[in-house]
Amino acid sequence: MNPPSAKAPSTGEDAGQRKSLAPRWSPSRNSEKTRWKRVTIPDWYGEGARVIEIVSNTAVWYHSGQPPVPIRWVLIRDPKGKFKTQALLCYGPDRENPSKL
């Protein structure tokens, strides 16, 4: 009887079945399809009034073994380019004024 052959450590995947990762999503600041809304925040971190742009919608968040949860997402960006475009998520998609997030 021969001993078993040496086997490479398992990666949890069969060789040849490994898939590449999906590219990271990034909002396009120049997309003409996105309808950004200008909002003035009266007191931006103690700096006074600041104009930002937002776009918002609702989605469903899925997690294995859990019931789906409705969420609201809000993208915010600075027209002056002083901070990077950011995504905010919250429960309560029925909020009609995402600028209050």
Image (cartoon, helix red, strand yellow):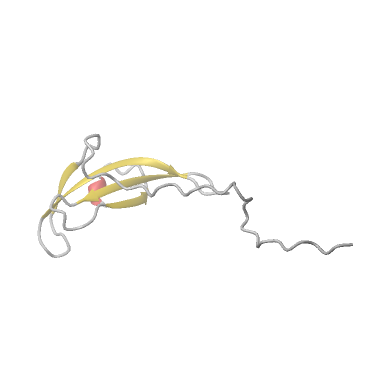
Q: Where residue 37 sits in the image (x, y, percent)?
A: 18, 41
Which residue is rendered at x = 25% and y = 34% of the image? Answer: 33
96 sits to left or right of 1: left
Residue at 49% from the left image edge and 46% from the top image edge: 62
| x, y percent for residue 61 | 45, 46
Which residue appears farthest toward the right when viewing the image? 1
Q: Nearer the viewer, residue 61 or 97?
A: 61
Image x and y of residue 64, in percent: 55, 49
| Residue at the far left in the pictured view | 48
Specify whether 74 is left or right of 70: left
Which residue is located at x 24 percent, y 37 percent? 34
> 20 or 84: nearer the eye?
20
Along the line of sight, the residue nearer the viewer: 62 or 21? 21
Residue under the point 59% across and 46% down? 17
Q: Quadrant of the N terminus?
A: bottom right
Give the farthest residue toward the top.
33
Q: How many marks?
A: 0
Percent of width and height locating residue 35: 22, 37
